[in-house]
């Protein structure tokens, strides 16, 4: 009996090039744009190792760090972790709170800010962000408080320069003038910064805090012409504000700010650095960190880029 013929092999499945292309596009869109920087507080639920791992996986090239979690993990250990992953530290938050009226309070603030400069230097941070401080209890003198900021900066700026750290004065929305920051506009921040060399002191332009100001385009041009824009941050303005207002920063695209227009103004003024997403929102903190990062990157592409 003759042997049965060998079975004909089944044809290989056709390769779906369209599917491959779609997957590649999806993977590319999930990765962060080149200028995207993630502020640590946006995904506060992540530990520092989780932050570094999540950013590395998503192609994020820069992070903004905060002093408390950095000190909790260890400044040297953080520098090693972040640097070893190839991440740039776009900013360290925060220094400042210079407005104490008594000599002991001013000396304490200066000492704390010197430590902040040393931490920023060890981390290789581009900028130490300064939140200048509100009015002391019982004080109603905004002009005097701003004068005390300049006095402390006169001592701090040379110290920071010697450590290779640039200071960035961040104006906060006027609703914070009483308790957090008597510097409420970019123009006021520039009035302070311009008392010092541009390579020592600049300004931080945060869309959440300055979007409402009709002088913003002119002030950004002024900052750019002087080489003073050291950091740009974005979050959206949503209402109603929560009780306490601090944690009311909105997800990109959820609020009233023309974020793309804001970045176009900053770029038009000559800024070419990272754009840091800084959102304080308990709703984001309650979610999975990887999910939040994917959403933030998608929103950044849709509303900022």
Image (cartoon, helix red, strand yellow):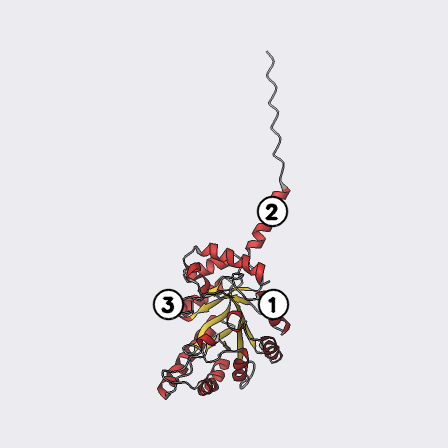
Q: CA distance from mark 3 to mark 1?
A: 38 Å
Tell me which corner region of the image, top left, top right, bottom left or bottom right, holds residue 66: bottom left
Above or below, 50 relative to 9: below
In the displayed orientation, state which residue is furthest to the front: 240
**Label 3 sits on residue:** 72
Name the disc covering residue 261, or none. Answer: 1
Name the disc covering residue 94, or none. Answer: none
Image quarter hosting the C terminus:
bottom right
Q: Residue at x 58, y 54 (%)?
A: 29
**Upstream in the sequence, badge 3 or badge 2?**
2
Q: Nearer the viewer, mark 3 or mark 1?
A: 1
Q: Residues within 10 Å of mark 1 (few under 14, many from 20)?
A: some
Image quarter hosting the N terminus:
top right
Q: CA distance from mark 3 to mark 2?
A: 42 Å
**Upstream in the sequence, badge 2 or badge 1?**
2
* Closer to us: 187 or 268: 187
Q: Residue at x 43, y 59 (%)?
A: 283
Q: Residues within 10 Å of mark 3 (few under 14, many from 20)?
A: few
**Could you tell whether 20 is left or right of 134 in the image?**
right
């Amino acid at each position: 009996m003759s042997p049965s013929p060998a079975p004909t092999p089944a044809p290989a499945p056709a390769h779906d090039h369209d599917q491959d292309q779609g997957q590649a596009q999806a993977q590319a869109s999930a990765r962060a744009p080149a200028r995207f920087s993630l502020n640590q507080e946006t995904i506060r639920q992540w530990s520092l190792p989780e932050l570094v791992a999540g950013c590395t996986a998503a192609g994020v090239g820069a992070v903004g760090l905060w002093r408390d979690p950095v000190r909790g993990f260890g400044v040297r250990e953080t520098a090693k972790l972040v640097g070893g992953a190839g991440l740039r530290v776009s900013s360290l938050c925060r220094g400042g709170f210079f407005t104490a009226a008594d000599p002991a309070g001013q000396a304490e603030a200066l000492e704390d800010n010197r430590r902040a400069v040393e931490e920023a230097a060890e981390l290789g941070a581009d900028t130490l962000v300064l939140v200048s401080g509100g009015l002391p209890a019982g004080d109603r003198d905004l002009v005097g408080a701003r004068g005390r900021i300049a006095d402390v900066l006169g001592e701090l700026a040379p110290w920071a320069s010697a450590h290779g750290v640039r200071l960035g004065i961040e104006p906060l929305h006027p609703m914070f003038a009483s308790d957090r920051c008597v510097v409420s506009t970019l123009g006021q921040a520039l009035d302070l910064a311009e008392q010092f060399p541009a390579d020592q002191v600049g300004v931080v332009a945060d869309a959440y805090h300055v979007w409402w100001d009709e002088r913003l385009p002119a002030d950004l041009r002024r900052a750019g012409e002087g080489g003073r824009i050291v950091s740009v941050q974005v979050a959206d303005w949503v209402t109603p504000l929560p009780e306490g207002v601090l944690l009311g920063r909105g997800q990109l695209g959820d609020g009233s700010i023309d974020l793309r227009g804001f970045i176009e103004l900053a770029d038009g003024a000559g800024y070419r650095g990272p754009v840091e997403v800084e959102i304080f929102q308990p709703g984001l903190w309650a979610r999975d960190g990887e999910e939040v990062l994917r959403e933030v990157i998608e929103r950044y592409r849709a509303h900022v880029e």
